[in-house]
Image: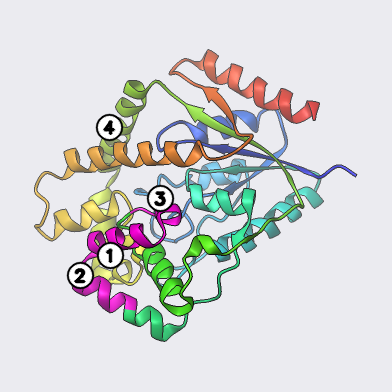
Amino acid sequence: MSKPKVICLSGPTASGKTALSFLLAKHLDIEIISADAVQVYRGLDIGSAKPTPEERRKVPHFLVDVCDIGTRFDVSAWHKEATDALRGILKKGKVPVVVGGAGFYIDSLLYGLSQAPPSSSRVVKQVEERLKKHGAQKMYSLFCDIDPEHASTIHPNDHYRLVRAWSIFLQTGNPVSHYQRLVNQEFQFNTWILEWDREILYQRINQRCIEMMDRGLLLETRELMDEGTIFSNSSARTAIGYKHAISHLKGELKEFLPIFQRDSRRYAKRQGLWFRKWEGARSLRIDDSRESMDVAIQEVISRYTDQ
């Protein structure tokens, strides 16, 4: 008996994933599961390029605005809710489409979650104290020597995942890569990676940063800072855009936009390195023309309907 099929559209930031998914909705009866580590939080709208309420009314979305910023929502929680959403969409006879650039979220669907044990609160506290004392760069550098395989999947400023990795090692004596993954054999994934000419992609990223500024990223961040909520969540306060806005508003970063753009481009490069690890993922070459988007849509549909 064949497995139910799931379309997965991924790619670097500003690569047109959302636009492509809405074009796909004109041809297939889809519902979307967001694979974004920041869009899950209410209030983080502009900096996460969250689909608008109007867009979500046109095409149902899951894993968007599912919790408050003060609630920790990790890859395990996302994996469970995403799996439940996939089952629900398929039960309705619709086509599930996973859309996003959070490589480690999509990775959990494709290859399963690590079977490492939960971290104890005592060890987590110890690691957080070390992180505060020595800094993220130092802790990350040390971890690269312990578990280079897993370290390659973590950004040095991703405090949550860095604390989790260190906690597992200190608690068990084993690196994260020591533990096997429980692979979900329930679905058949058709995974696509949107690819652009680098210079054009970088121009799009630069323009997106400008648009976020114009839409009020600094004001949004100021309100979150005034509430104090963003400081309670390491994923939120270290996310590209928000961490730059926080530093700028605190007077620590004068040249906000150029640094925001530079780090967004660097993030896109890291995303590309992650995507290349996915066996069986197919490339969709895109440019700024509507024709290239139409060709990409037809390729996705053809592969989906033929299997």
Residue contact at pointers 4 and 3, CB within 8 angstroms: no
Other residues around mark 2 within 10 Å, as few (<14) / some (14–19) / many (≥20): few
Amino acid marked by disc 2: His
| Vertical comparison of 100 with 140: above or below | above
The answer to whether residue 146 is magenta is yes
Q: Which of the two discs, 4 and 3, sits closer to the camera?
A: 3
What residue is rendered at 16% in x and 45% in y? Answer: 256
Q: Identify the disc placed on residue 139.
A: 1
Left or right? Give the position of 146 relative to 64: left
Secondary structure under the numbered disc 2 in the rendered image? helix
Q: Is residue 156 above or below residue 224?
A: above
Q: Which residue is mark 2?
A: 134
Judged by depth in the image, the label closer to the viewer, 2 or 4, is 2
Q: Residue at x 45, y 53 (%)?
A: 149
Visible in this render: residue 147?
Answer: yes
Count numbered badges in the picture. Answer: 4
The image quadrant where one finds the N terminus is top right
Q: Earlier in the sequence, mark 1 or mark 3?
A: 1
Discs 1/4, front: 1
x and y, in percent, of residue 214 in the image: 25, 40
Q: Nearer the viewer, residue 205 or 175?
A: 175
Q: Name the residue that disc number 4 marks.
A: 206
The Cα atoms of the two marked residues, 4 and 3, are separated by 26 Å
Q: Give the spatial CA distance, label 2 vs label 4.
A: 33 Å
State the separation of the CA atoms marked 1 and 3: 14 Å
Query: Where residue 142 appears, x then y in whole percent?
Result: 29, 62
Q: CA distance from mark 2 to mark 3?
A: 20 Å
Q: Contact (CB < 8 A) between labels 1 and 2?
A: yes
Under mark 4, the amino acid is Asn
The residue that mark 3 highlights is 152
Separation of marks 1 and 4 at Cα, in angstroms: 31 Å
Label 4 element class: helix
